[in-house]
Image (cartoon, rainbow, N blue to C red):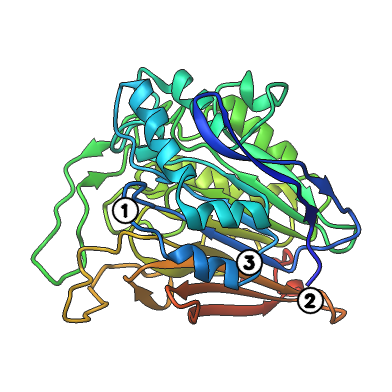
Amino acid sequence: MSKLFIFAQCVCLEWGILVIATTAAADEHTPLTSIAFGSCAKQDQPQPIWQAVRGSQPQLFIFLGDNIYGDTHDMAQLRFKWNQLAEQPGFQTLRESCPVIGTWDDHDYGADDAGAEYPEKRESQQIFLDFLQVPQNDPRRSREGVYSSQVYGPAGQRVQVILLDARYHRSPQKKGFTPGEPGEGYRGKYIPNTDPGTTVLGETQWKWLAEQLRVPAELRLIGSGVQVIPDEHGSEMWGNFPAERKRLFQTIRESGARGVVLLSGDRHLAEISRLPIGHPDSIGYPLYDVTSSSLNAPSGNFTKSGVRFANEINSYRQGLTYFDVNFGSIQIDWTPADPVVRLQVRELEGGVVLQQRFRLSELSPRPNR
């Protein structure tokens, strides 16, 4: 399989973080056909998942948050923890084979469930960008938030990757969720924050997103640290800010953007959700949210006896929920006139455990019905 980038590697210590330095030259004539993504990696524990990730032959890997568990106000300690991830042998090998990009969530941002109130967010941002080897002249170095966008591949086969920052500007969450009795599927602690002026992205990022959705592309992957479509479980999610969730769907719909797929992490479980055409907030075609988590820290519902299920309410779920170690994979077959896209969740040995398959033309706006 041809690769999107050609690399020269060396090991160096830069910005206080061990990195594998790479020299990359983009090949605009080579389309992306294999993309991997994942979230929630304990940096101080073994990470055997990288072998399976490499086995899927990704041309790009996307981190979706909780890439480490920093949870500190000590920036030296935060750098140390990013360095632990950089030193993972499997991750080093992955980084040598393909570009690694990403956004963050609460634990690598700096504190559990934190938002705009986290006092070290500016310092944490620079450390995160150091880990990603982002150049000093990149816009992310000078703006508030780690959001980014990039288009890969030639005209007719373009994949746009939009990574949102749902932490830097996010308003406080409200507690008060009633979980119900065990087994009923309501497990969180948050209730919707409907106060006027609450935000997830902040106005500058909202404006930027609307502009990015008008950049020419055939397939658009929008990454968010927390789930977008599920809105019932009471844990962290866009559903805790219903006006912002509605605004996201409206922004996509009004842009006329085709081929939008959501990617998310955070939950220590994997599932695929779909917002149907008939939903009041429909974007005009089925909208999928592929959640992949965790890379090496499976949910507490996964027991040594082999149980891999638990009841959690999600009216949008397609198929089952997977609780063991996993990563996400997107396979794109550009060969047919109407390309085929496979959204997958894969387990530790690399096998596909969840999949949604569709033709790219199915992600085209149409009237609600």
Local packing at callout 2 (Cα closer than 10 Å; few below 14, some 14-19, many 20+) is some
Mark 2 sits on what residue?
339
The residue drawn where x is 74% and y is 69% is 33
Q: Is residue 88 above or below residue 259?
A: above
Q: Is residue 66 above or below residue 159?
A: above
Local packing at callout 1 (Cα closer than 10 Å; few below 14, some 14-19, many 20+) is few
Q: Amino acid at mark 1?
A: Gln
Residue 57, x across and y down, in percent? 65, 69
The residue drawn where x is 10% and y is 67% is 182
Q: Quadrant of the N terminus?
A: bottom right
Q: Mark 3, mark 2: which one is toward the viewer?
A: 2
Q: Which mark is residue 368?
A: 3
Seen as rendered, the residue at the extreme left is 181
Mark 1 sits on what residue?
45
Q: Nearer the viewer, residue 54 or 167?
A: 54
Q: Amino acid at mark 2?
A: Pro
Q: Is residue 26 above or below residue 358?
A: above
Q: Amino acid at mark 3?
A: Asn
Whether tag 3 and tag 2 are in contact, CB under 8 A, the answer is no
Q: CA distance from mark 1 to mark 3?
A: 47 Å
Query: Which of the marked residues, 2 or 1, is nearer the chain's N terminus?
Result: 1
Q: Quadrant of the C terminus?
A: bottom right
Q: Nearer the viewer, residue 106 or 51?
A: 51
Local packing at callout 3 (Cα closer than 10 Å; few below 14, some 14-19, many 20+) is some
